[in-house]
Image (tube, rainbow, N blue to C red):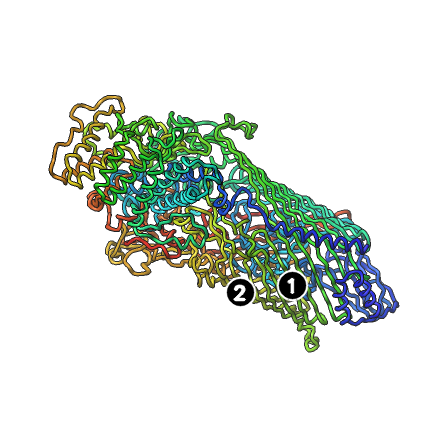
C-alpha cells in the first residue's frame, strides 16, 4: 500500500512540475506589438493604412459607445466649426439636449467640454494608427518581408503622410501648440514622456515637409487607384499643401500650389452646385472625401444622418439671410420648412435622414473651396482683378446651376462682382462668398479665426466670444491623464 | 518512546521525508494512561426539543465514544471521572459521575460561536481556541434567517470587518463583499473556498447546504491561499450526513415584496408649472411669451400618470429546500434539492430570477485508512434580465424622467394606435416632429420597455470536488489528501430586441420605413460560453499531540489551477416574424448578420507549507509559506512568495488565572503576513495588437515588469470568553498595507489614441481599523436569548503613487485618487450657495462669469482667480465606509422564537447621480418635488438653484450630488413557532413569519443608500418583503 501511495506522491510532484509549461500562454486572437513590428504581413500593412482613414468618417461611435458628454459619438467639426459659428444652431428647436453643444454655441464652455475632447481624441487616435502604418512602410526590408510592390508601398506611404498631415492640421488650427508624435509609442512610460506640446511652427514645418514627400510618392493620376477611388490622391496632397500655405499666410505659395493643381487638369467646378454632394467619383470637383457605403461589413455608412433625424444641426436666421435672392445654393444647403440639411444628407428630398448607415460621402476638399483660397491669396497679394475673377467664377457656377426643382434662377441672380480697387471690399466679397458657398462644410469658424474677425463677427451675432476662444481648451481629461505635462491654453 | 521511534525509523527508511517527523518525535515524551474498568454508563443525548443527537462525543477519562443514530451511547468509567459531552454547535457539558450511576440522559443546549468549535481554515481545520490569526465564524442560525438566495449577501452585518451590499435591488443582480476595506483600486473581491475548491463567485451555492462558513481576515490566516488572498478568504464547507438515522428536512417559504423609498415625483400640474418656469428662465425665450407647457394645459389628451406607481407592483418569491442525510459507519451522505424563484417588483414577468440546486455529498471510509468522497453541486439559474441600470433603455430611469402629462396607453382613436403595442411612446405623437421632442424629450415608456424585453440569461453550473484521503502511521497522524475540484459553467444568453414604439422619422426613403423607433430593426443576439476551471490539490498533513503537551500540525501541498473560457455568439436582425417560435437565428435576415467567438485562459501553479505548534495548549505558534506561479505575469515576475507568522498566548490557561472563575477563556494573538492579488487581465505584460473589423490597432500597452500586488497585514487581537462562555468578546486591530497596487492607468490619448488602460504597479494603500465582536447568551431560564453585535472601522489612505500617475482620474466615477486621500475620492467643484443677484456674480467671477445668472449654483472659487474652472476642483467625498456594524438578536420563549438583524454603515459618501438627472438636467424631464423649492428671486432659496433648460451649474460634477450615505437598517425580523409533537414521523415542525428591510434610517436621498456603485444612477429600488414559511423535519 505504501508503495502505491509513494508512487502517487511522486506522480503528483511530476505532474505539478510539468505544469510549469502552463505558465506561458498565448494571447488568443492578439499579436504583440513586437510581432507586428518585426514580421508584418501584407494584410497588416494594408489594413493599418486603411483603418487610419476611419477617424475622418461620419460613422457613429467609432470611439466608445454613445459617449455624448465626452463628444465621442461623431466627429466634432460639426460642433466646433459650425455650431460654434454664426451659421448653425444646435437643433431646429432649442432644447436642453446635449448642453455641452449649447456651451460651445454660447461660448460658455470650459476645458471639460466634450467638443474639444472629441476632436482631440479623434485626431490623435488617427495619428496613432497612421504612425504604425508609417513605421511599417518605412521599414527598409518591408518589400522583402511582406512582398508589397514598390509602387504600392510608395502609394500607401504617400497616403499615410497626407492622413497624418490632415489630423495635425485639424489639431493646430483648433488647439495651437500640440504634442508632435511621429512614430508609435513603444512603451507605456514613453506615452507620458511624449505628451508635451510642440510649437505650432514646428508642426506646420512637419506638415509641409510630409506633404512634399507624399507628392513625390503618389502617382500623377486623378485617383491613386482606379479600383479604390476613395484613397488619397496626389491632387489631394497638393490641395492640402495649398491650404497649409493659406493658414500660414504664404500667399505666393498658395497661388503657385493652386495653379499646380489646376494644371493637372483633373479638377473643375461641376456644372451643378449640388453634384459634389449627391454623386461620387464621377464629378470633377471633389478632391478629397471620405467614402461612405451602406450595408457593408464592417459597417461603413454615414452616421451623421441619424442625428439629423433627431433634429440636430439647423441654420441660424443670420445664415439663411446671408444668401442673395434666388441663390440656388440656399435650398441645396438647407430646406428650412422640411428641416432638412440637404448638403449633409446628400439628398434634396429627405432621403437618408435618420439613417445611421447612409451612403453619402463626407466632403473634405472640393475645387470651389480651393479656388477661393487662391482668391484670398490674390487679395492679400493685392492682385484684386484675379481675385474678383475667381469669386465671379464661383458665382457664375452657382447661378447656372439648376435649382432643386430643375429651373435656372432668374436673370440677374448673383450678378458678377464689378471691378474694384478697394481690397477691403473685395475681401468682404470673398468672406460673403465663402459663407454661402461652403455653409455647413465645417469651414466657417476656422475662416473667421484665420481672418482675425471671429471676435467682431461673433460679438455682433450676440455671442460671448473672448480672445481666449481663438483656441479651444486642451481637454481637461488629457491634462489630468498626462499628470501635468500638458499645459492649458491661456484663459481656460 | 522506543516503540514510536522504531516506527518513525521504519518509515524513514521507506521515505526520506520521514526523518523530518523523527525529529519532532525525538523531542517528545510518551505519556502512559491508566485503564481501570470499573463501571459502565449508558444514556441518550438529545437536543432541547428531545430529538436524538447522533455522533455526539462522550468522554470519560481517556475513553471516548460517540452516540449512535438514536442518540444512545455506552462508555466505561472510573468513579470520580466526569462525563464530558461535546458536540459542535452545542454547549459542552461536564458532569461528575456519581458512584453506582449507570444511566445518564442529557439534553444539550445549542451554543453559538464557542471558542472550542472546530473551524475550517486554510487546507486544514483547527480548534477555534488554538487559532492565532484573525478568523470569524459565521452564525448559521443568523444567516439562515436572512431568507435571501445569495450566500455572500447573507453575510451582511454578520461578521466584524466584512462589508456587504447588494448591487441593486433587482433579483439576481449580485452583491459586493469587502473584507477590511478597499485594498486596491482593482479587483477587491474575496476568494471563496468551497469544500476546498477556490472560486470567485458563489452565486450557485444554496444557503441551506452550508455547514460552516469562516472568514479569514488577516494575512496570517489567508496567506496560505497566496496570490489570490489579499482581499480575504471565505472558507465554506457544505453539510455532510451524520452516521445514524436518516433525516429529511423541508423548508418552504413564500414572500411578497414591494418597492420602498421611492422619490416623490411631480404630478402633471406641478410638472407644467415647473417646466413653464424653466422655459421662461431659458435664454432666448421671451419673458411675456406663452410657453408650450402653459399652452398644453388645455390639451384634451393630458394625463396625470404616476409612472412609478404604474411600473411597480408586488413581487413574489418562493423557496423550497429539501434535503435528506444520513449514513452508516462506512458511508455518510447528504442529498439536497432546492428551488428559489422570484418575480421582481416591476410589472410583468420580465425581471424574474430562478435557481435550481441539486447536491450530492458522499463520504465513504473504504478502509480504516482510506476515505474518499465527493461534494457535488449542480445548479441551473435563469435570470430575466431587465435593463435595470443605466440610461438606455433603463426602465427605472425612464419611469422617473418621463413626464406625467403622458398616458401609459394610447387612445384607440389615435391614428398610430396598434392593439399589439398600445403603449404611448413619443410624447403626444401624431407624426413628424411637431415640437414634441423639444417640449417633452425622447423619453421611453417604461412599461413598453418591460413588455417588449425578452432577455434570458441562463447558467448551468457544476461545482464540486472529489477527494481521497489516506492516513499513514499507526496513529493515523499523517494524512495524504488529493482533491480534484471542478467548476464548469455554461452560460447561454439570448436577447430578442423586438421593434416597438413610434416611427419617429416617418420617412418613406428611410432604410426601414414604418418601423417603430426602438430596436429598429428587430434583432436577436445569442451567445454561448463556457468556463472550465480545474483545481488539483495535494496535501500531506501531519497532526500529532505528543505527551498531551506538544501539538503539531504540519502541512505541505501543491495546487494547480487551470481555467479556460470560451464563447461563441451570433446575431441577426430584421426578423419577418417576431413571434416566439421565430426567435431563433435561422429566421432573421441575411443582411447584417454576425458571428463571434473567442477564448481566454489562465493558469496558476502553487506550492505551499504551513506548520503550527502549541505547547501545553497555551503557547501557540504558526507559520505559512506559499509560492505561486501565474500565467498572468511576464517572465520578469512570474513567481510570487507569500509568507506569514502568527503567535498566540492562551493566558487563561496559565496557573495564575485558573482560579478566576468568571474568565472562561482568554487568548492574545498577533500575526503578520503577506498575501497577493493577481486579478488583472491576461497578458497585461505584453503590448497587444488586434485586427478586428478592418482595423489594425494597438489595444493595450503592456507592462513587462508588472508584478503581484502584495498586501502586508499586521493584526493584534484577543478572543475572550467570560461567565462560563456566556459572554464572548473578540477584538482586533489591523494594519493592512497594499504595495504595488495593480492599477489600470489611462494613458494620454495624445500619445496612444483611445485605447485600453495599461496595468501598472501604481503605489501603496493602507487600510487600518479596529474590529469588535461581542456576543452574550443566556439560556438559563425559560426566556432564552442571545445577542451578537459587531463593529468595525476602516480608515483608507493612499500613501503614494508612482511619478507618472500623480493622480488617477476616473471621469466615469467622478473620482480622483492621489497620495494622502482615501482611494477613489469624489472630486469636483464645491457647492457654496446660490447666486442671489448679479452683483454677487460680478464680485466673485470678476475674471470670467461664463454666462452665470442669478439663481445659478455658486461654486467655491478655490484659487480665487475670479472664474470657476477645472482648477477649482477639490475632494468632495469619501466612498469607503468608515464604520460598519451589525446586531443580531435571537430569543426563545416556550414554543416561540424571535430574531432580528440590524445592520448599517456610518461615515460614507455617495455620488447621487439620479439627483442630477431628475432635478438638475437641462432637458424637460420629470423631477422630484424638491424642485418646487427652487430659487425664483432674491432670497427665495439658498440651496436649490433656479429651474432652467440652460446649465444652472447642475451640469458640473460637484458636491451638490455628494451625499452622506450612512444608514441603519432593520434588515430582517422573524417570529417562529415550534409545534409540540407528541410522536409520529414528524420530528420537528416550525412555522415562521419574517419581514425584510422593514425600517431604514438614512439622510441619503437616492433610492437606496446600500447601492454599491460609486455613482448611484438610481438603478433598481430596494424592496420591502413579508414572508411566511414552514420548516419540517422527518
Residue B390 at x, y percent in the picture = 46, 44
Asked whether the viewer can see residue B212, the reply is: yes
The residue tagged 2 is: B769
Q: Is residue B485 above or below residue B786?
A: above
Using the image as rendered, state which of residue B327 and residue B710 is in the foreground: B710
Residues at discs 1 and 2 in contact (Cβ within 8 Å): no
Q: Quadrant of the N terminus of chain B?
A: bottom right
When asked about the image quadrant of residue B410, the answer is top left
Left or right: residue B128 compared with residue A359: right
When asked about the image quadrant of residue A371, the answer is top left
Q: Residues within 10 Å of mark 1 (few under 14, many from 20)?
A: many
**Chain hosting mark 2:** B
The residue tagged 1 is: B624
Using the image as rendered, state which of residue A286 and residue A444 is in the foreground: A286
Disc with the residue nearer the chain's start (1 vs 2): 1
Residue B672 at x, y percent in the picture = 59, 66
Q: Residues within 10 Å of mark 2 (few under 14, many from 20)?
A: many
Amino acid at each position: 500500500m505504501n508503495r502505491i501511495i509513494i508512487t502517487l506522491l511522486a506522480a503528483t510532484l511530476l505532474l505539478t512540475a510539468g505544469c510549469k509549461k502552463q505558465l506561458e500562454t498565448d494571447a488568443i486572437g492578439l499579436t504583440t506589438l513586437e510581432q507586428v513590428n518585426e514580421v508584418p504581413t501584407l494584410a497588416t500593412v494594408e489594413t493599418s493604412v486603411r483603418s487610419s482613414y476611419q477617424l475622418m468618417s461620419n460613422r457613429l461611435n467609432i470611439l466608445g459607445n454613445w459617449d455624448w458628454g465626452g463628444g465621442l459619438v461623431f466627429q466634432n467639426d460639426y460642433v466646433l466649426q459650425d455650431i460654434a459659428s454664426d451659421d448653425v444652431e444646435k437643433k431646429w428647436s432649442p432644447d436642453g439636449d446635449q448642453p455641452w453643444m449649447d456651451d460651445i454655441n454660447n461660448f460658455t464652455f470650459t476645458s471639460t467640454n466634450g467638443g474639444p475632447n472629441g476632436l482631440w481624441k479623434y485626431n490623435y487616435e488617427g495619428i496613432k494608427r497612421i504612425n504604425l502604418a508609417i513605421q511599417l512602410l518605412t521599414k527598409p526590408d518591408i518589400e522583402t518581408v511582406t512582398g508589397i510592390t514598390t509602387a504600392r508601398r510608395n502609394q500607401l506611404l504617400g497616403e499615410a503622410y497626407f492622413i497624418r498631415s490632415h489630423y495635425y492640421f485639424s489639431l493646430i488650427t483648433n488647439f495651437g501648440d500640440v504634442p508632435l508624435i511621429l512614430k508609435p509609442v513603444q512603451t507605456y512610460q514613453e506615452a507620458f514622456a511624449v505628451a508635451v506640446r510642440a510649437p505650432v511652427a514646428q508642426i506646420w514645418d512637419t506638415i509641409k515637409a510630409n506633404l512634399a514627400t507624399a507628392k513625390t510618392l503618389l502617382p500623377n493620376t486623378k485617383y491613386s487607384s482606379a479600383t479604390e477611388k476613395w484613397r488619397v490622391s496626389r491632387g489631394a496632397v497638393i490641395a492640402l499643401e495649398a491650404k497649409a500655405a493659406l493658414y500660414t499666410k504664404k500667399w505666393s505659395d498658395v497661388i503657385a500650389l493652386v495653379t499646380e493643381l489646376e494644371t493637372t487638369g483633373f479638377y473643375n467646378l461641376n456644372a451643378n452646385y449640388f453634384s459634389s454632394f449627391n454623386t461620387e467619383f464621377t464629378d470633377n470637383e471633389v478632391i478629397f472625401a471620405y467614402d461612405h457605403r451602406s450595408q457593408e461589413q464592417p459597417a461603413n455608412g454615414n452616421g451623421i444622418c441619424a442625428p439629423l433625424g433627431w433634429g440636430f444641426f439647423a441654420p441660424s436666421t443670420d445664415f439663411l439671410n446671408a444668401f442673395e435672392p434666388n441663390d440656388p445654393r440656399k435650398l441645396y444647403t438647407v430646406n428650412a420648412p422640411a428641416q432638412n440639411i440637404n448638403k449633409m444628407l446628400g439628398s434634396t428630398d429627405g432621403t437618408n435622414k435618420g439613417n445611421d448607415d447612409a451612403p453619402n460621402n463626407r466632403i473634405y476638399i472640393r475645387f470651389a473651396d480651393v479656388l477661393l483660397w487662391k482668391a484670398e491669396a490674390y487679395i492679400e497679394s493685392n492682385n484684386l482683378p484675379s481675385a474678383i475673377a475667381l469669386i465671379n467664377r464661383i458665382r457664375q457656377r452657382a447661378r447656372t446651376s439648376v435649382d432643386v426643382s430643375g429651373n435656372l434662377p432668374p436673370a440677374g441672380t448673383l450678378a458678377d462682382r464689378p471691378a474694384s480697387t478697394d481690397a477691403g471690399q473685395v475681401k468682404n466679397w470673398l468672406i460673403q462668398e465663402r459663407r454661402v458657398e461652403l455653409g455647413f462644410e465645417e469651414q466657417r469658424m476656422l475662416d473667421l479665426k484665420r481672418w482675425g474677425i471671429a471676435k467682431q463677427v461673433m460679438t455682433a451675432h450676440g455671442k460671448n466670444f473672448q480672445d481666449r476662444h481663438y483656441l479651444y481648451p486642451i481637454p481637461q481629461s488629457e491634462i489630468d491623464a498626462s499628470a501635468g505635462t500638458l499645459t492649458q491654453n491661456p484663459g481656460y | 518512546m522506543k516503540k514510536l521511534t522504531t516506527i518513525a525509523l521504519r518509515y524513514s527508511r521507506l521515505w526520506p521525508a520521514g526523518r523530518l517527523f523523527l525529529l519532532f518525535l525525538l523531542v517528545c515524551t510518551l505519556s502512559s494512561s491508566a485503564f481501570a474498568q470499573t463501571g459502565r454508563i449508558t444514556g441518550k443525548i438529545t437536543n432541547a426539543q428531545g430529538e436524538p443527537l447522533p455522533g455526539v462525543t462522550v468522554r470519560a477519562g481517556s475513553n471516548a465514544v460517540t452516540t449512535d443514530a438514536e442518540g444512545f451511547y455506552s462508555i466505561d468509567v472510573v468513579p470520580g471521572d466526569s462525563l464530558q459531552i461535546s458536540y459542535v454547535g452545542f454547549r459542552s457539558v461536564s458532569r461528575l459521575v456519581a458512584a453506582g450511576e449507570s444511566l445518564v440522559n442529557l439534553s444539550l443546549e445549542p451554543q453559538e460561536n464557542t471558542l472550542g468549535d472546530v473551524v475550517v481554515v486554510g487546507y486544514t481545520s483547527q480548534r477555534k481556541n488554538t487559532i492565532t490569526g484573525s478568523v470569524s465564524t459565521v452564525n448559521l442560525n443568523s444567516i439562515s434567517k436572512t431568507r435571501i438566495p445569495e450566500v455572500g449577501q447573507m453575510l451582511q452585518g454578520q461578521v466584524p470587518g466584512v462589508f456587504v451590499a447588494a448591487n441593486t435591488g433587482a433579483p439576481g443582480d449580485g452583491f459586493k463583499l469587502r473584507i477590511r476595506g478597499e485594498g486596491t483600486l482593482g479587483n477587491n473581491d474575496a476568494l471563496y473556498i468551497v469544500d476546498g475548491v477556490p472560486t470567485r463567485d458563489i452565486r450557485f451555492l444554496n444557503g441551506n447546504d452550508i455547514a460552516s462558513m469562516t472568514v479569514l481576515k488577516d494575512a496570517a490566516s489567508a496567506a496560505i491561499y497566496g496570490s489570490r488572498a489579499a482581499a480575504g478568504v471565505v472558507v465554506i464547507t457544505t453539510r455532510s450526513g451524520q452516521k445514524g438515522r436518516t433525516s429529511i428536512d423541508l423548508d418552504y417559504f413564500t414572500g411578497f415584496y414591494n418597492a420602498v423609498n421611492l422619490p416623490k415625483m411631480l404630478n402633471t400640474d406641478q410638472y407644467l408649472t415647473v417646466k413653464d418656469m424653466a422655459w421662461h428662465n431659458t435664454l432666448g425665450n421671451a419673458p411675456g411669451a406663452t410657453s408650450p407647457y402653459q399652452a398644453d394645459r388645455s390639451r384634451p389628451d393630458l394625463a396625470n400618470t404616476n409612472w412609478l406607481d404604474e411600473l411597480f407592483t408586488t413581487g413574489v418569491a418562493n423557496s423550497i429546500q429539501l434535503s435528506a442525510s444520513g449514513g452508516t459507519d462506512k458511508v455518510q451522505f447528504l442529498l439536497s434539492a432546492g428551488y428559489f424563484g422570484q418575480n421582481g417588483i416591476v410589472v410583468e414577468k420580465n425581471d424574474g430570477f430562478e435557481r435550481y440546486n441539486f447536491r450530492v455529498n458522499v463520504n465513504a471510509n473504504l478502509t480504516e485508512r482510506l476515505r474518499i468522497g465527493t461534494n457535488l453541486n449542480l445548479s441551473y439559474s435563469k435570470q430575466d434580465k431587465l435593463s435595470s441600470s443605466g440610461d438606455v433603455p433603463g426602465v427605472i430611469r425612464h419611469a422617473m424622467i418621463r413626464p406625467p402629462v403622458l398616458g401609459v396607453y394610447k387612445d384607440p382613436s389615435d391614428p398610430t394606435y396598434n392593439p399589439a403595442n398600445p403603449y404611448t411612446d413619443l410624447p403626444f405623437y401624431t407624426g413628424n416632429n411637431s415640437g414634441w421632442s423639444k417640449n417633452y424629450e425622447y423619453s421611453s415608456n417604461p412599461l413598453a420597455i418591460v413588455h417588449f424585453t425578452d432577455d434570458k440569461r441562463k447558467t448551468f453550473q457544476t461545482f464540486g470536488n472529489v477527494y481521497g484521503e489516506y492516513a499513514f502511521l499507526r496513529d493515523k497522524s499523517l494524512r495524504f489528501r488529493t482533491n480534484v475540484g471542478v467548476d464548469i459553467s455554461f452560460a447561454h444568453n439570448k436577447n430578442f430586441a423586438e421593434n416597438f414604439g413610434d416611427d419617429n422619422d416617418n420617412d418613406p426613403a428611410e432604410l426601414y420605413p414604418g418601423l417603430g423607433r426602438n430596436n429598429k430593426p428587430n434583432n436577436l443576439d445569442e451567445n454561448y460560453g463556457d468556463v472550465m476551471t480545474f483545481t488539483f490539490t495535494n496535501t500531506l498533513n501531519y497532526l500529532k499531540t505528543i505527551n498531551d503537551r506538544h501539538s503539531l500540525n504540519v502541512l505541505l501541498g501543491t495546487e494547480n489551477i487551470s481555467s479556460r473560457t470560451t464563447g461563441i455568439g451570433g446575431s441577426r436582425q430584421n426578423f419577418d416574424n417576431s413571434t416566439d417560435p421565430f426567435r431563433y437565428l435561422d429566421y432573421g435576415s441575411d443582411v447584417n448578420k454576425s458571428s463571434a467567438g473567442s477564448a481566454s485562459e489562465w493558469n496558476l501553479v502553487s506550492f505551499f507549507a504551513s506548520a503550527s505548534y502549541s505547547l501545553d495548549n497555551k503557547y501557540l505558534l504558526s507559520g505559512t509559506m506559499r509560492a505561486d506561479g501565474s500565467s498572468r505575469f511576464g517572465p520578469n515576475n512570474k513567481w510570487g512568495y507569500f509568507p506569514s507568522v502568527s503567535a498566540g498566548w492562551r493566558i487563561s490557561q496559565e496557573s495564575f488565572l485558573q482560579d478566576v472563575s468568571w474568565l472562561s477563556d482568554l487568548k492574545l494573538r498577533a500575526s503578520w503576513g503577506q498575501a497577493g492579488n493577481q486579478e488583472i487581465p491576461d497578458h497585461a505584460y505584453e503590448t497587444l495588437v488586434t485586427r478586428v473589423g478592418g482595423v489594425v490597432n494597438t489595444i493595450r500597452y503592456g507592462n513587462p515588469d508588472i508584478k503581484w500586488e502584495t498586501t502586508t497585514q499586521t493584526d493584534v487581537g484577543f478572543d475572550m470568553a467570560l461567565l462560563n462562555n456566556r459572554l464572548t468578546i473578540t477584538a482586533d486591530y489591523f494594519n493592512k498595507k497594499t504595495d504595488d497596487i495593480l492599477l489600470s492607468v489611462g494613458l494620454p490619448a495624445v500619445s496612444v489614441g483611445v485605447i485600453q488602460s495599461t496595468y501598472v504597479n501604481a503605489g501603496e494603500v493602507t487600510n487600518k481599523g479596529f474590529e469588535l465582536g461581542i456576543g452574550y447568551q443566556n439560556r438559563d431560564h425559560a426566556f432564552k436569548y442571545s445577542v451578537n453585535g459587531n463593529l468595525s472601522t476602516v480608515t483608507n489612505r493612499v500613501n503614494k503613487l508612482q511619478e507618472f500617475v500623480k493622480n488617477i482620474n476616473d471621469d466615469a466615477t467622478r473620482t480622483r485618487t492621489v497620495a494622502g486621500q482615501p482611494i477613489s475620492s469624489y472630486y469636483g467643484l464645491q457647492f457654496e450657495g446660490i447666486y442671489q443677484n448679479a452683483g454677487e456674480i460680478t464680485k466673485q467671477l470678476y475674471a470670467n462669469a461664463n454666462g452665470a445668472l442669478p439663481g445659478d449654483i455658486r461654486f467655491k472659487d478655490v484659487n480665487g482667480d475670479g472664474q470657476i474652472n477645472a482648477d477649482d476642483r477639490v475632494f468632495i467625498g469619501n466612498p469607503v465606509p468608515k464604520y460598519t456594524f451589525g446586531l443580531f438578536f435571537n430569543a426563545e420563549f416556550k414554543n416561540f422564537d424571535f430574531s432580528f438583524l440590524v445592520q448599517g454603515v456610518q461615515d460614507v459618501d455617495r455620488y447621487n447621480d439620479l439627483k442630477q438627472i431628475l432635478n438638475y438636467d437641462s432637458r424637460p424631464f420629470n423631477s422630484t418635488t424638491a424642485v418646487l423649492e427652487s430659487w425664483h428671486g432674491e432670497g427665495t432659496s439658498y440651496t436649490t438653484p433656479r429651474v432652467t433648460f440652460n446649465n444652472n451649474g447642475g451640469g458640473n460634477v460637484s458636491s451638490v450630488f455628494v451625499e452622506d450615505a450612512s444608514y441603519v437598517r432593520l434588515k430582517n425580523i422573524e417570529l417562529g413557532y415550534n409545534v409540540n409533537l407528541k410522536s409520529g414521523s414528524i420530528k420537528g415542525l416550525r412555522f415562521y413569519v419574517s419581514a425584510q428591510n422593514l425600517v431604514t434610517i438614512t439622510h441619503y436621498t437616492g433610492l437606496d443608500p446600500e447601492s454599491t456603485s460609486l455613482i448611484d444612477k438610481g438603478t433598481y429600488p430596494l424592496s420591502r418583503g413579508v414572508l411566511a414559511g414552514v420548516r419540517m423535519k422527518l
